[in-house]
Image: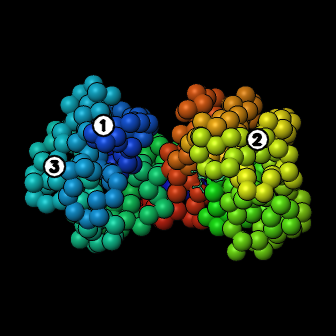
Amino acid sequence: MFNGYLTLEDVDVTGKRVFVRVDYNVPLDEHGNIVDDVRIRETIPTINYLLDKKAKIILASHLGRPKGEPNPKYSLYPVAKRLERLLNMPVKFSSKCYGEDVKKLVDGMKEGEIVLLENLRFHPGEESNDPEFAKFLASLADVYVIDAFGTCHRKHASMYGIKDYIQPVVMGFLLERELKYFEKALVNPQRPVIAFIGGAKVSSKLGVIKHLLDKVDKIFIGGAMAFTFLKAQGYNVGSSLIEENMFDEALSVIEQAKEKNVKFYLPVDFVCGEAVSDQTPVIEVAWQEIPEGWLGLDIGEASLQMIKEMLKDVQTIIWNGPMGVFELEKFKSGTFGLAHLIAESPALSIAGGGDTDYAIHKAGVVDKISYISTGGGAFLELLEGKTLPCLTAITRKQ
Ligand code: AMP
């Protein structure tokens, strides 16, 4: 499916100016320290390859939402410093992402040098896909590499508009890996395939759930979404979070699952509280026994047992979204329990989304998940069956 696109290894980059659009949108604490540098580490294979080829490497990314103007809070300077440590070599930082100074800096680069540009979103042209800005970025390079999977669903100048001003545009190793795993899990998977979808709202995951019904053999819906599915069928869910305007859609999903022979599962028990708080008393009840005034805030032990059984014959696992309010101590066991069950399974497992990624890290099972996507929105759009706009920017093989 993704074989027709040019990748880094298909082009000659030796000694050339290579622009690499990365996704260094990393979480920072209130002092501007990088809390998690996975997104930086994941680009090292592409950078090392280019270093081996003695390319002049120009890295560029966005960070946060500075809304088209410089804002020191969102500077990529700390990322340049982290990169220096990870690569054990100097990384020049350009305090601008546009203009003569940038051009001069790049013109003066020697082979095997690295420059990181300041946050692309400090220029309003990035998010508005301004042709002038795209043209400027393209003018800095001979070869353009897209390695920012997390931004692939955005039609921004550095991700999309550039294709009109530079050829070839190729995939970096990170993007290639993301798409390969996606293909393994959803395009040509080993069956049976199971999807675990959790989170708060059916409305935001409806497209994903519907698309997955054509792809998977089993689907398990957890998180608050489960209550919309239960209530739509007329069951009592106490004061749990529901979306009344999604009842018809929920019933139609259940119907479609039957028609498509996809086994559709909801949790069989819940951990409930009287409020979304760690101070609330907690009870664990069967799914039809949530008392009035109580909210289901996590899946319970019986649901995890059921999942363990379901996983026995499965060859491929897809996971997005928490099973409960995993941010709270009292309601994290379901999500962490699922992370452990997936980790123990020999099946190919891919997971994505900010919360899911965080839960897998917290559960300490990163190494046991086959692939954790670096993209939240982009991962969901792939699960929804959408074409990522950036793919239309990548040069096709002849
Ligand atoms: P989403 O962004 O749709 O993936 O939703 C993630 C959010 O859903 C997390 O912040 C969870 O705390 C929340 N969530 C998961 N399960 C529940 C639940 N049973 N009740 C309320 N919120 C939930």
- Mark toward the viewer: 2 or 1: 2
Q: Amino acid at mark 3?
A: Ser
Q: Which residue is mark 3?
A: 95
Q: Identify which amino acid the numbered label 1 is placed on.
A: Asn
Left or right of residue 348, residue 98 in this image:
left
Residue at mark 3 to residue at mark 1: CA–CA distance: 18 Å
Q: CA distance from mark 2 to mark 1?
A: 39 Å
Q: Which residue is farthest top? A: 88
- Which residue position holds label 2? 283
Does the residue at mark 2 contact the one at mark 3 (Cβ under 8 Å)?
A: no
User: Which of disc 1 and disc 2 is earlier in sequence?
Assistant: 1
Q: Position of residue 163 (x, y in %)?
A: 37, 65
In the rendered view, would you say 124 is above or below 177? below
Judged from the image, the secondary structure of the residue bearing numbered disc 3 is: loop
Q: Residue at x 78, y 57 (%)?
A: 292
| Residue located at (73% from left, 28% from top) | 344
- In-image side of 17 versus 344 (left or right): left
272 or 4: nearer the viewer: 272
- Position of residue 393 relative to residue 104, above or below, is below
Residue drawn at point x = 38 percent, y = 60 percent: 159
Q: Amino acid at mark 2?
A: Ile
x then y, percent, for residue 91? 22, 36
Q: Nearer the viewer, mark 2 or mark 3?
A: 2
Res 307 visible: no
Of residue 356 and residue 311, the one placed in the foreground of this image is: 356
The label shown at residue 33 is: 1
- Crowding at dot 2, Cα within 10 Å, few <14 / some 14-19 / many 20+, comes out as some
Q: Is mark 2 within 8 Å of ligand 1?
A: no
